[in-house]
Amino acid sequence: MRVHLITGAGSGIGAAVARRLLDRGDQVVVLARDVGRAREITAVLPGATALVGDLSQPGRLSWALSKQPLPERIDSLVHVAGVVDLGPVADLPANLWESQLAVNLVGPAELTRLLLPLLRVSRARIVFVNSGAGLHAHAGWSAYAASKHGLKALADALRSEESAHGVRVTSIYPGRTATPMQERVHQQEGAEYRPERFITADSVATTILTALDLPDDAALTDLTIRPAG
């Protein structure tokens, strides 16, 4: 049985990936920011187990994981969790830069670092769910795009560093996807939220499972997915 650790499994893309993996009989471990959130997520994902670690506090992840039993193996690490706060550079305060960089970039880097010994043994696949903002930055998206551009750099460097250990690294760049995060983005933009215009979370989950399920002689490095309309 393959074991997958997923961040951001409480809703949206992460929840869709977790359900698909559980439905096919794989083992799913979710990362939750606190015990209460861990209970909420596992209640709606029967069969999943949870680790507690707050990506918004990367410096405490090592301590948090040291207090919990880790899985004996991890076949994939899927980074989905993210936060977004829009605003022009002239108005965006430091705390909103710091929170987005922590959750979207530094937290994933630190979690990956801590789990690399297990990931190397399993010759695991690591998937970073990035964003179209990780390739192109637009007005009002400076902090979020900076965090996602950094996530691309992290994935590219990690891919080169860990290939000798058989670890494969994929970056996926979804366009606008019908998730609670996208609804919040529309609220910040002052725009009407019409989910039917966007990619479904399940469609993005399909691309993630494709990366996870490739034969060992192949690796998907970068994939962009956009709404068809």
Image: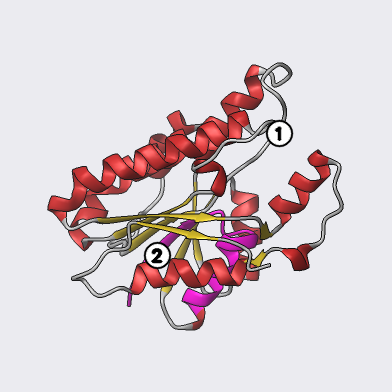
Q: Quadrant of residue 83?
A: top right
Residue at coordinates 64% horizontally, 68% vertically from top-left? 43
Side of 1 relative to 34 (left or right): left
Q: Secondary structure at mark 1?
A: loop
Color encoding of the figure: secondary structure
Frontmost of labels 1 and 2 is 1
| Residue at the front extreme, as displayed | 229
**Badge 2: residue crowd in 10 Å (few <14, some 14–19, many ≥20):** many
The residue singled out by tag 2 in the image is: 4
Q: Which amino acid type is shown beneath numbered disc 1?
A: Leu
Q: Which mark is residue 86?
A: 1
Residue 198, position as x, y percentages in the image: 70, 63
Residue 58, position as x, y percentages in the image: 46, 33
Q: Is residue 20 magenta?
A: yes
Q: Quadrant of residue 208?
A: bottom left
Q: Is residue 104 magenta?
A: no
Q: Which amino acid type is shown beneath numbered disc 2?
A: His
Q: How many marks?
A: 2
Q: What segment carries the magenta color?
A: 1-22
The answer to whether residue 197 is above or below residue 103 is: below
Closer to the chain start, of discs 1 and 2, is 2
Side of 165 relative to 130 (left or right): left
Tell me, yes or no, if residue 56 can be seen here: no
Q: Which mark is residue 161?
A: none
Residue at coordinates 69% horizontally, 51% vertically from top-left? 181
Instruction: Mark 1 and mark 2 in contact? Answer it, CB < 8 Å.
Output: no
Q: Secondary structure at mark 2?
A: strand
| Residue at the bottom extreme, as displayed | 24
Give the distance between the C-alpha atoms of the residues marked 1 and 2, in whole angstroms: 31 Å
